[in-house]
Amino acid sequence: MADNKEKLFDQFPPVSTETWKEKVVADLKGADFDKKLVWRTNEGFNVQPMYRAEDIENLKTTDSLPGEYPFVRGTRTDNEWFIRQNIVVENVEEANAKAKDITSKGITSLGFKLKGAVSAEELATLLKDIDLSKTEINLDSCQKNAANVAKALVEYLTSVNALEVFKGSLKFDPFVKLLKHGVNFPGNIAEMAKEVIAVAAPVKNLRVIAVDSVLLSDAGAYITQELGMALAWGNEWMAQLTEAGVSADEAALRIKFNMGISSNYFMEIAKFRAARMLWAQIVKQYNPACDCACKINVHAATTKFNQTIFDAHVNLLRTQTETMSAAIAGVDSISVIPFDAQYKTPDDFSERIARNQQLLLKEESHLDKITDPAGGSYYVETLTNSIADVAWKLFLEIEEKGGFYAALKEGWIQTQIQESSVKRHSDVARRKESLLGTNQFPNFNEIAGNKIQLECGCHCGCAQEEEGAVAAIPTTRAASDFEALRLATEHSSVRPKVFMLTIGNLAMRLARSQFSANFFACAGYEIIDNLGFKTVEEGINAAMDKKADIVVLCSSDDEYAEYAPEAFKLLDGRAEFVVAGNPACTEDLKALGINNFVHVRSNVLETLQAFNAKLLK
């Protein structure tokens, strides 16, 4: 039988990139193509507005299949990832009961945060009736207890004949002390790591050496920074362990990467793809006996940096897209931060929602049914190579400094992250980086102070008493400055009233009143909007009737030259006067004593901090 199927696109002539660009340039009507449409990322490279097949023709990343070296398309031929939930172990019986409950509700990976060393008997209680052949187990304790916990785990697994079926990890990562506290870990790190690996030897699928770059993501690192530093971190372990006599295969197969996921959707997909490729190439240089040792094992956790206290349910949107990125990218396991974790201990409801976010992606969206669905995408393939290129340069820079450990002891790693955190906080202050519900479109009347139940985040019992020799990475979230601002308003005996004096051009006054309302609501002020006034005097009188603390004149640039001087004079210092916009007559208005202007280039945070200083009691 003849094949009568037609190929749809054969009916259309091919269109060159030059032709497409000519059309775009024509539609731009004289605007510069590069300035208007090419995006310079914070990751250090440009992103074009369109990509075509020719952009990936010479990329080596498209040559392999899932499961094939260098594993850019995945370390497995399936996309079945573990759904993890973490449990803080205060009492082993209670932790076991919770673990059994959540494994019956879709959890396939458990993360136990231990307060101290545990015995084989305590582990037996903790893991009682948990199917170790189906559930991944991850133990996190103080670094000094790692070898003892490993011994207890091996003893327990031997007693229940589960050495072969067990899958999981034990976190030994003494570099964290330098990162979080600026204090060097005492003792010979390589020898201690070698001891932990030796103890873990009977358990094939127990990874005991951690690379915790999730800490960098939580501190505000950019994507290429996290990746480049994570690679250097992993290479530090490979170098130290092989020099200590551990084989390359054994060292690589005992390392687990714990990485963060930011809300930069496509770039996070590309980051994990690039991580697999670059790590495979690094391990390959140590001449392992099997390419299987070159496979990276990645646990991905949603980032804390962009989590918010105000409008906290928006955290669900953030973590959902982040989880999608990691799932599509093909990581090994994912944990989702409950939406209320930044202001209280998560409750059963928020933990359930966090679990269901992953179950939704599996059971309803079927993201586990296809491996590397982003493979072949002109955009994602190009991003993968761009991110890999920048991250590799950072990796080489760290190696030139003597490696990750040397750069840590020098404080260079911490300084780089601190600079990124400062930059991102500045971008949030200027709204160049948006946090929905915090610096953009806040819930005007939300009160959050009464729901905050902050607790110490250290559950291991290792209190930090030493003064750091070098700087530590920052811990403040992107929203922290705005939250402090708004909480100050809540705790004040007065709530400033902001009155929108709308007059003149209908479109401009409405647009500017909406902009200004959102601007001042970021500080938790009461907003009084209006449909419009016929005269300036009518508006000022209405503002005084409402006992306004701030009067915002909302009109068009052309009309400000007339309306602003009149309004300022009639107000006569009875309230703060603000002009919404940055009109051409700004200098003339400043000459009259009008100094407050709010517009898209304003530093929102600093502006509102100044008003708080004037108005709060």
Image (spheres, helix red, strand yellow):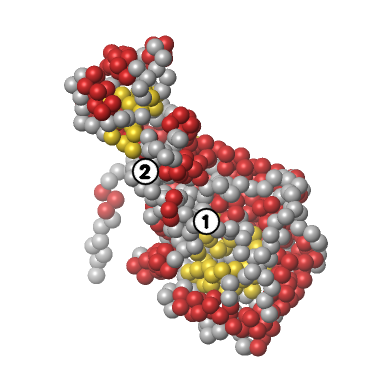
Q: Is residue 17 visible?
A: no
Residue at the (23%, 62%) spot, across then down: 4
Residue at the (62%, 88%) spot, across then down: 160
Q: What residue does disc 2 label?
A: 442
Residue situated in front as seen by the camera: 453 or 63: 453
Residue at the (76%, 47%) spot, across then down: 469
- Dot 2: few (<14), some (14–19), or many (≥20) neighbours within 10 Å? many
Please state if 60 lies on the left or on the right of 6 as rendered: right
- The span from disc 1 to disc 2 (Cα, nearest Å) is 22 Å
Residue 23 in percent (x, y) is at 32, 32
Residue 400 in percent (x, y) is at 74, 45
- The first of marks 1 and 2 along the sequence is 2
SS for callout 2: loop
Location of the N terminus by quadrant is bottom left
Q: Is residue 192 above or below residue 221?
A: below
Residue situated in front as seen by the camera: 181 or 323: 181
Please state if 470 lies on the left or on the right of 11 as rendered: right
Amino acid of disc 1: Leu
Disc nearest the viewer among 1 and 2: 1
Determine which of the numbered discs, if any, sits on residue 454 in the image.
1
